[in-house]
Structures are given as C-alpha cells and as structure tokens.
Image (spheres, rainbow, N blue to C red):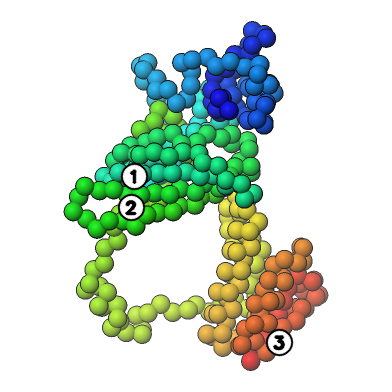
Amino acid sequence: MKFKLGDFVRFVDEKREGYVTKIIDNQTLGVTDEDGFEIPVAVSNLTSVHGHGVVTEELDAPKTIQVNIPSINKIENGIYIAVATDDKAGNVVHFHLQNHSSNILLISLTTERKEKYAGAFYGIIESYGSTLVYSASLADLDLWPEFNFQVLVFSKADVKPIDPLVIRKKFRAKDFSTEQKELPQLKNKGWLIRLDDLVPVTIDPQKLKESFFRSTEEKKTVEAPQKEIDLHIEKLRDDHHFLEADEMLQIQINHFQTAMDAAVVHHFDKIVFIHGSGNGTLRDKIHKLISKNPNVKTYMDARKEKFGYGATEVVFK
C-alpha cells in the first residue's frame, strides 16, 4: 500500500484533505479531516500531498517547546523505542528505534499477529541515532502485532563482541499509562520505552568472594505469611486496570506460590487462600499446584459461612 499512517492526503472527487489515521483494509483507509471526523475512504479516491509526510524531515524553524511537558534528562546506554504522538493525525503514534550507545546496530523488525508475519523494517542505526520503524493508531492498541527485533551490535573499540540480540515486545495499555514527555532527538512528545540494556555487566571479584562466605545470619530470611491470603488482583497490584488477563493470573499464581513456600518454612498447620468464585480459572490452577505439593496433607473448601465458595483451606503434613 502506498499510504501510511500519518500521511497527508487529498480526496480525488471532492475538495477535502486530511491525515490517514486508520488502515481499515487493503482497499480502505480512515482519514481524519480538519473538523476532526474520521471518514472511511477508498484508496483509489485518495492522492498524496507532498511535503506533509511524517518520514520527511521538516526544514522549517523548530516548533516552540511547551513548557508544561517534562523532558527526559538522563538516558542510560541501551536500545529504546520512542513512541511519538502525532499532533496532526490524532491517535496515530510513530515508533522510532533509538540507539543510545556508542555501538552501531544492524536492525530488522518483523511483526507477528495470529501467526502471521510481516517484515516491517531493516537497516543500520548509527551510534546515538534514531530512525522511524513503524506507525500505528492508539485506538487499535488491542490489534497491534507483537514486535520481533533482531539486532547485531558492532563496535570499533577493543571489546568482546556482544551476542546477537532477539527482542520481543508486545505493547500493552500500561506502557502508555505514564505521563508523556519530550522525546530525545525528536520534536514530539510521547513515551520512551527501553527494550534492552547494552551496558556490559561488571562483577566485583571481592564482593563475589565475600558472598560465598557470608554467615547464615546475614542471609535473607523468609517472612511468615498471613494465615489468610487474599489473591484478588486488586489486593496485589494498584495498576491492575492496565494488566492483561494472563498477566493478572501469573501475578496471582506467583503470590500463591510464595505464600505456600513461606508457610512450609514456618511449619504452618494450615493456610487459607481467598481466590473468589469467578470463572474458576485461578481456583483450578492453585488446586492443581496444591495437589502436587509433597508437603500438603489435604485441602478443601474453606468455611463457607465466612468465605462462601471463594476460598481454599490447605492442611500441611
């Protein structure tokens, strides 16, 4: 397709212009006009207006920076995605891959959704460079593909080569829940998301040696859990509104397992897990884990007069 998100286009059969804000299918685009209305338009009924594209670098004087937008001051070495908003094209955001290191990166980006793959970008990013690799609409966040970056790292310095990197990233609503900031190397505001850290790991031999001989009193102790553990996600995470269902379930399972292990360490006779009734997914998961735990004598529904049908009592050997 010759049009991209953020392109400025003109209607062929009427006097109207706007920005491409949605790709509906191969034959139809969503175009937002100057009144802010998004209109479905056939690709054959559109023509490009040169000089307004997001890829073309603007040679005009820099735009005035809004003083109420915080900036990102210190950036550690690494690979980042700068997700920049588009002031003209509404919900459209542009993904700029940024190399904040002295290395040179050879990059390929492949997208994947429902086991369908598409090559989106390949190229070289110089040290401390930035390049546009993708555009999408925030309104279609749930439909975004997973990003698969393959990275070769080159350095002219006398350093051990870094192994090729494969970075997979699925963007979630929580990635965009923070305040927008002025993006480095760009004129736009948006979000800066770290993909990987290129800073070499350094090990202090003396500290490593000391850790081997550290006394047991200095080692981390396991705190005794409560007798009743509430696994409702709103009790575990304040940001649960931004989590996907599978993320919530994994957090609940991890919290359950931590409490189970701690209960065994502290020789509990029993412990109660409050999981709620719901669709039974969490209950079935923890029941399966309980049944395989060699320290468990038996388990049963906890007192119904107190918990209803939404809790499980575990009795240890």
Q: Position of residue 103 (x, y in %)?
A: 28, 46
Total numbered badges shown on the rendered structure: 3
Residue projecting furthest to the bottom? 317
Where is residue 304, by image quadrant? Answer: bottom right
* 17 or 163, nearer to the observer: 163
Is the C-beta separation of discs 3 and 2 under 8 Å?
no
Nearer to us of marks 1 and 3 is 1
| Gap in angstroms between the C-alphas marked 3 and 2 | 49 Å
Nearer to us of marks 3 and 2 is 2
Q: Amino acid at mark 1?
A: Leu
Where is residue 56, by image quadrant? Answer: top left
Residue 309 vertical placement versus 128 (above, below): below
> How many residues crowd mark 3 within 10 Å: few (<14), some (14–19), many (20+)?
few
Q: Position of residue 142 (x, y in %)?
A: 64, 43
* 305 or 310, nearer to the observer: 310
Q: What residue is disc 1 on?
A: 105
Q: What residue is disc 2 on?
A: 198
Asked if residue 22 lies left or right of residue 211, the reply is: right
Is the C-beta separation of discs 1 and 2 under 8 Å?
no
Q: What is the secondary structure assignment of the residue under circle 1?
A: strand
Q: Amino acid at mark 2?
A: Leu
Work out whether mark 1 precedes mark 2 in sequence or the reverse, and give the earlier one: 1
- At x 26%, y 67%, the residue is 203
Nearer to us of marks 1 and 2 is 1
- At x 45%, y 48%, the residue is 149
| Gap in angstroms between the C-alphas marked 1 and 2 | 11 Å
Would residue 90 be visible to someone looking at this image? no
Residue 257 vertical placement versus 293 (above, below): above
- Disc assigned to residue 209: none
Q: What residue is disc 3 on?
A: 298
Asked if residue 51 lies left or right of residue 295, the reply is: left
Residue 19 vertical placement versus 294 (above, below): above
